[in-house]
Image (cartoon, rainbow, N blue to C red):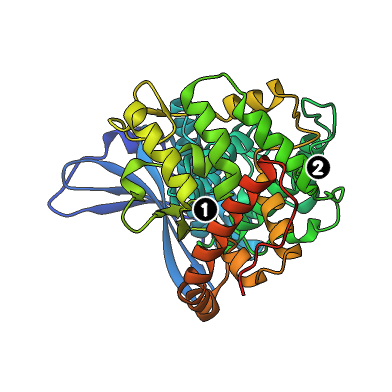
Amino acid sequence: MPKLATPLTDTALRNAKGKDKPYKLSDGGGLYLLVNKDAVKLWRLDYRFEGKRLTLAFGKYPDVSLSVARAKRADAIALIDAGTDPSETKRTERIEQTQHKEINQREASGLPLFGSFEEVALEWFNTKIMPLSESHSNRTMAYLKNDLIPYLGKLPMIEIKAPALLECLRRVEARKNKQGKPVTETANRVREQMGQLWRYAIATGRADRDIAADLRGALGVHVQKNYSHITDPKLLGQLMRDVETYSGATVTVAALRMLPLVFTRPKELRTAKWADIDFETKEWRFFSEKTKIDHIVPLASQVIKLLRELQPYTGVGEYVFGVRSGQRPLSEITINQALKSLGYGADIIHPHGFRHTAATMLAELGWDENAIDRQLSHLVQGVKGVYQKAKYIEDRRKMMQAWADYVDQLKLGAKVIPIKSA
């Protein structure tokens, strides 16, 4: 470092005037006051670091006094002696101060912090989840708001470790459903979604690895159970006879009679639209939100008759099984309660279980499994899916009519006979 010059005094600093050109008043050790033409006085420190001549600014005099400038010089010299560039240190401090200010401003305005779990999670939700079905996006947002953001929200995404995420999932797993049973399936579903979130964070540079993958097997195993369904032909026949006696609303009666004959998912039936029904081709075509594919349901003559009878009640509205003149779809609870009122609780038959009933009986009666799977709208990927959609449609027409005839026979108490055509 340069040798110390004659030390400056406050009197000399106060009396320094502007000249035609900027000039320096040296205090020694590289510290000097730069006096500009307009008499603005700026503290500077010249120093060398790794063979380079550099300058560090300490602020304006008299805002920064002589004693403070000398203290800053001493701090800078100590950093240089320790092998650190004081300019880099100052730059880092300035960045940290700016970041701290931004953090305070975002917290005050209620915005998530940059790079935090909350910011990345909401961005992922808006980009990847929001375009999907309303029910799926609502469930996902509920998981984020209730189970994850309150605990991980402010943490930098890149710093979150697997145990912190596991702790959140454990809280989900510890909850009970309305039947008092653990919601293991929900906890595992949230873990799978967190895998999607972390892969999104990796792709956007906010995480290094998928920590959700480390938690495979850490939660309880969910045992998938099929919806309760009927496999006894005689019991199905009795159910169909009981349905005929149901004295509820016309729309509910029609839904109860039709659901066993089309074996779509209950929500797909409840939200069926008149615009998707083609009476000439005897087809119901719609886009399946579950599998994200177009689905075709060939309609047996019995189903066409039911639709014709229902049309005067809801035909002016959008939904086939609609309330308020077809403006709103029938609720899931209504179908469940109707079956329950007939003595068929969830332990005997679930509305979704009619799919299992039809699939099981059709398979036992010799119908092609590919045609059954396609009619159930099970997702088949790639070329095979396109091939099945085209190849099995005629088989499915025959199968759906034969199934409706078979159910009618059971309803009448006729002898159970095979329904597969030669």
Specify the quadrant of the image occupied by residue 195: bottom right
| Mark 2: amino acid | Thr
Q: Position of residue 182 (x, y in %)?
A: 84, 35
Q: Which residue is denoted by mark 2 in the rendering?
A: 184
At 40% from the left and 32% from the top, the residue drawn is 310
First in residue order: circle 1 vs circle 2? 1
At 62% from the left and 64% from the top, the residue drawn is 372
Measured in 3D between alpha carbons, the distance from the residue under mark 1 to the one under mark 2, in whole angstroms, is 47 Å
Q: Residues within 10 Å of mark 1 (few under 14, many from 20)?
A: few
* Mark 1 secondary-structure assignment: helix
Q: Position of residue 16 (x, y in %)?
A: 26, 40
Furthest-front residue in this view: 414
Q: Quadrant of the N terminus?
A: bottom right
* Mark 2 secondary-structure assignment: helix
Q: Which residue is denoted by mark 1 in the rendering?
A: 92
CB within 8 Å, label 1 to label 2: no
| Mark 1: amino acid | Thr
For the residue pair 89 and 248, the one nearer the viewer reads as: 248
**Between tags 1 and 2, which lies in front?**
2
Q: Position of residue 413 (x, y in %)?
A: 72, 42
